Image (cartoon, grey):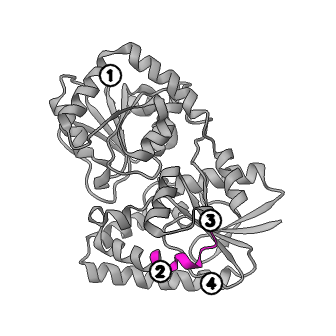
Amino acid sequence: MKNILINALPMTVVGTGIGRYLRGLAGAVEAGYGGAVRLSYFVGDRVVDEPPAVRGAGWRERLGQLLWRMPHPVGYGARLVRHAWTEKCFRHICSGYDVYHEAGYFPFKPSEKVRTVLTVHDLSLLRFPEWHPRERVCYAQRFFLERLDLVDGFCAVSEFTKREMVEHLSIDPARIIVTPLGFDNTLFNEADDPEAQKVLVGAGMPEKFILFVGSGDPRKKLDLALAALEKSRNPLPLVTVGWSGWSRMDAPGVFNMGYVTDRVLAQLYRKAELLVMPSQYEGFGLPVLEAMACGCPVLTSDAEALLEIGGDAVESVRDVRDADLFARRLDALCDSIAQRTLMRERGRNRAREFSWERTARTTVGAW
């Protein structure tokens, strides 16, 4: 049996992004491969045997927001001090494990006997630094690029991300295993959830709406969605969902739900007329998969990863900078019940090709 140490720090913060990936992976590994591997979770100053509990935004998120707003030298220095302390704890703890699995962009330096497997979600920090706080970019350049030589094996969340790793990081493709993400089909499905619906009603949710799921990250292109809706002849409001450490997501005509539980998120997918995801760049695009599983039609940009995940189940806009084009495609879909019905059927079929069990199987192979 292999002993695997997962850096679970992304699981101790608000349940989005990398934390969602790690929870799905860990749950599927524990369920299907408990006889082959034993998982432990590093939470910053100690190791625990169970994944950290899901929770909403707290002091860690507020600290991150503070760092992003500080002048660059101060924020960068504070991040370096925090990293040094955490890495010291990690090096003391990690001996005795066979594999250290990192999914949070910045690998720690383990003891010599521990093999490292790194999951890469995307290369936005390197390829598009203008979208990120400066201190975070400097941190990535120091602790990502300089430590790639310490990594024994790589996982990429999509074929697109693998191609980028080969092209921009010069990593041998034979060292990269593609491990697509999955979804929890007990949560993300078409079965109506009355309790979650009560939450939506209590929040004053409009009966019909367009849905946007994502942070205030500039690459998500919320501004394009708003510009397209202004040009659209469709009067449906835009509902936005997601914790934002980047910028405020409030805007005139927008119903901002902020961070919501997975049950509420799944109900939003079920009730939305469309999910719009005009992201300029993604490594995978989990909202596309979750929306398809819930029977929600999806309109995306032509970002390669989104088209890879959505296949023929999604509609896309060729140029994400063209709000007029996006508005026309949005209007065409809102006007056509038949097209949305076809997209729902195709989306359900497409979603069946993804599962956390598949993610676990390929990741255990990497370990």
Mark 4 or mark 1: which is in front? 1
Q: Secondary structure at mark 3?
A: helix
Residue 243 drawn at (x, y percent) = 38, 52
Closer to the N terminus: mark 4 or mark 2? Answer: 4
Magenta stretch, residue numbers: 145-153
Mark 2: amino acid: Glu
**In this rendering, which labeled residue sits more in front, label 3 or label 4?**
3
Of the two numbered discs 1 and 3 on the same chain, state the one appearing first in sequence.
3
Is residue 69 depicted above or below 230 in this figure? below
Q: CA distance from mark 2 to mark 3?
A: 18 Å
**SS for callout 1:** helix
Q: Quadrant of the N terminus?
A: bottom right
Residue labelled with disc 3: 175
Q: Which amino acid is tagged 1? A: Leu
As helix, strand or loop, the secondary structure at mark 2 comes to helix
Q: Nearer the viewer, mark 1 or mark 3?
A: 3
Q: CA distance from mark 4 to mark 2?
A: 18 Å
Q: Residues within 10 Å of mark 3 (few under 14, many from 20)?
A: few
Query: Which is more N-terminal, label 1 or label 2?
Result: 2
**Residue at image mark 4:** 91
Residue tagged 1: 333
Q: Nearer the viewer, mark 2 or mark 3?
A: 3
Give the residue pinned by disc 2: 146
Residue, x 25% and y 23% (percent of image)?
331
User: Do the residues under discs 2 and 3 have CB atoms within 8 angstroms?
Assistant: no
